[in-house]
Image: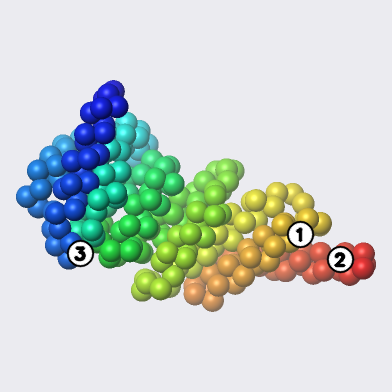
């Protein structure tokens, strides 16, 4: 493991490199950036030699900390220049389950309109929205939960950008399901917070259906509408 002094030096040199170019320009030629590009190429070759998706994720979790100092410096000193290392790390962090770390980069990337390396074949906003949505939906299918606040931030960050309706529908669906998971089994919605979550979930699921008729949320919408009607009746009975 690198010493704190070495990590600090890496962060400082990354910040200096990131400050050498402006939006629309490339960091090519900046020594620290070129070193990290070389490391990235080595790690990509290692990943390409692995067939197992689960093993690829394990390797990403293994190597990602080696980029932390660079990422921190690039975000600190960056002026919006194109950075393929930063963008690749953002996607890898999502793959590895480091959603907070991915969002740190996503805020910067969307602010300065950074693009993904060519192999991703999607706009930055579309990739962020879809990768988060798929991660959330997979987690919930497996019986886990997902941070609704993170999904809501992704929705806000990408709200004004152009992408396929199906991708945005998937994000709304994931957020709706995450809000429902946060409610738990309290179908009576006695708590104001749970009622608000259910209302927000319904709003997002309706948005998903409007954007994509095949989003698979019709049945859930009907169930949630009944729960909210019952809650309204209970609340009226107590007044």
Instruction: Pick whichever of labels 1 and 2 is earlier in the sequence.
Output: 1
Quarter placement of the N terminus:
top left
- Say which mark, if any, is on residue 235: 2
* Local SS, label 2: helix
- Identify whether 126 is placed above or below 4: below
Check disc 3: other Cα within 10 Å, few if <14, some if 14-19, many if 20+.
Answer: few
Q: Which residue is mark 1?
A: 192
Q: Residue at horizontal 30%, vertical 43%? A: 72
Residue 136 lies, in percent from the top left, at 50, 51
4 above or below 216?
above
Q: How far separated are the C-alphas under marks 2 and 3? A: 53 Å
Residue located at (72% from left, 69% from top): 225
- The total of numbered circles placed on residues is 3
Quarter of image, res 188: bottom right
What whole-number distance in Å separates the C-alpha atoms at marks 1 and 3? Answer: 45 Å
Query: Does 64 sit above or below residue 86?
Result: above
Location of mark 3 (residue): 23
């Amino acid at each position: 493991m690198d010493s704190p002094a070495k990590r600090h030096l890496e962060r400082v040199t990354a910040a200096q490199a990131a400050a050498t170019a402006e939006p629309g320009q490339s960091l090519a030629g900046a020594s620290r950036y070129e070193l990290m590009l070389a490391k990235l190429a080595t790690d990509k070759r290692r990943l390409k030699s692995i067939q197992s998706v689960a093993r690829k994720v394990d390797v990403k979790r293994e190597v990602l900390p080696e980029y932390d100092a660079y990422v921190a410096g690039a975000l600190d000193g960056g002026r919006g220049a194109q950075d393929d290392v930063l963008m690749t790390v953002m996607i890898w962090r999502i793959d590895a389950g480091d959603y907070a770390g991915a969002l740190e980069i996503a805020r910067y990337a969307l602010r300065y309109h950074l693009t993904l390396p060519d192999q991703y074949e999607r706009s930055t906003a579309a990739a962020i929205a879809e990768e988060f949505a798929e991660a959330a939906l997979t987690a919930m299918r497996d019986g886990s939960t997902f941070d609704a606040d993170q999904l809501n931030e992704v929705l806000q960050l990408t709200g004004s950008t152009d992408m396929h309706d199906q991708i945005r529908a998937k994000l709304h669906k994931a957020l709706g399901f995450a809000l429902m998971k946060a409610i738990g089994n309290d179908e009576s919605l006695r708590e104001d917070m749970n009622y608000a979550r259910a209302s927000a979930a319904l709003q997002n699921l309706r948005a998903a259906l409007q954007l994509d008729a095949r989003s698979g949320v019709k049945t859930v919408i009907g169930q949630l509408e009944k729960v909210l009607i019952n809650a309204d009746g209970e609340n009226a009975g107590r007044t």
